[in-house]
Image (cartoon, helix red, strand yellow):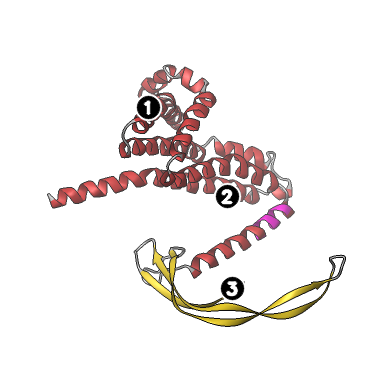
Amino acid sequence: MEKEGQFNLLKNVRSEKAPYIVIAVGYVSSVIMILGTYIRFIVLGGYRGTLDESLVDMYQESSGGILGNCFLLTMIYSMFLICINYGKAHTGIRSIAAKIEAIMQLVLIVIPFSFLIISQMFYPLGAFLEIILSPLIKGLGYFDIALNNFPFFALVLYGTSILLLFLEKSYRKFIAYWLGLFFGVMVIGQLLIELFQYKILAVLICIIGAVLVGVRAYHAWTRRCPSCGKWDCFNYVGEKVLREEDISMVVENRIRDASGNMWGTCEQHIPGKGQVVLELYRCNKCGHKGTKTVTKNIASV
């Protein structure tokens, strides 16, 4: 019974993480697609003018390949899985709404596009697969309505799913990841490809990106857990005042003339509180707790 309970717990954890794993695959495949297209553009002499096609044309070609299909499938399946999880985790109207959303997505988006993408991936392998793929190709005929009206169905189904999930705080992180992937590829990715056609802009963007990544990495490093060693997880959770005493604080006041223009400064002593504070920290990965003692001066007026 104990092993069975542990298995069910592990199964539930995997089920909850499945949409996030799928969306992570989407981020990885999208980054590889964008960087791969740009690297191929450089290697083939794109900046030397020896290519017949532009970087935008190469990116559009890559978008229709395996990595582009992977991006589309991760968008589709991650939302489908999160709706299933939402329906299982709730009861009543919300559960029914989520399950209806999942069924509609399955019929109008998941199955039709899975059939379409699989047939596109295997079609170039040759005519010898025609017998194997013939049921698949015939099956696409049943989903003509869904495929031809994909923008409408996607707008309605994904719009209502996002609104439903947004009502609960614990699902908003997934919505942020999902929308980030969508706009990252469809908007930011397209914009970067347009700009990267010009070498000077590509260099400037790479420098700015490297600086931002470095700053973010340093910030994550300063919040590493002393126990498990993982970065960006040792978070401030509260504080306790250990000692407090009355003090006199020196502040600098600005002196202005009748017109409101500042012409000097003067020092002023004001009453305040000197505190010795114990800050509390907790790792959201391993649960390790830590403290740090700091002093604070707080003005009383």
Name the one closer to the observer, 205 or 250. 250
Q: Is residue 269 left or right of residue 227?
A: right
Give the structural element (helix, strand or loop) at label 2: helix
Name the one closer to the observer, 28 or 222. 222
Q: Quadrant of the C terminus?
A: bottom right
Which residue is disc 1 drawn over?
100
Query: What's the residue type where badge 2 is placed?
Result: Leu
Vertical position of residue 156 compared to residue 247: above or below = above
Instruction: Pinpoint residue 14: horizontal percent, then vertical percent.
Output: 31, 47
Query: Of label 3 and label 1, which has the lower sequence position?
Result: 1
Instruction: Pinpoint residue 93: horizontal percent, then vertical percent.
Output: 36, 30
Give the structural element (helix, strand or loop) at label 3: loop
Query: Of label 1 and label 2, which has the lower sequence position?
Result: 2
Label 2 crowd (10 A; few <14 / some 14-19 / many >=20): some
Instruction: Pinpoint residue 293: horizontal percent, then vertical percent.
Output: 46, 78
Label 1 crowd (10 A; few <14 / some 14-19 / many >=20): some
Which residue is disc 3 drawn over?
300
Prevalent SS, magenta region = helix
Vertical position of residue 281 compared to residue 185: above or below = below
Q: Which residues are magenta?
A: 201-207
Which residue is disc 2 drawn over?
35
Label 3 crowd (10 A; few <14 / some 14-19 / many >=20): few
Query: Of label 3 and label 2, which has the lower sequence position?
Result: 2
Is 85 a magenta residue?
Answer: no
Vertical position of residue 46 compared to residue 94: above or below = below
Query: What's the residue type where badge 1 is placed?
Result: Ile
Q: Nearer the viewer, mark 3 or mark 2?
A: 3
What residue is at 49 percent from the left and 46 percent from the top? Answer: 177
Give the structural element (helix, strand or loop) at label 1: helix
What residue is at 63 percent from the left and 41 percent from the top? Answer: 190
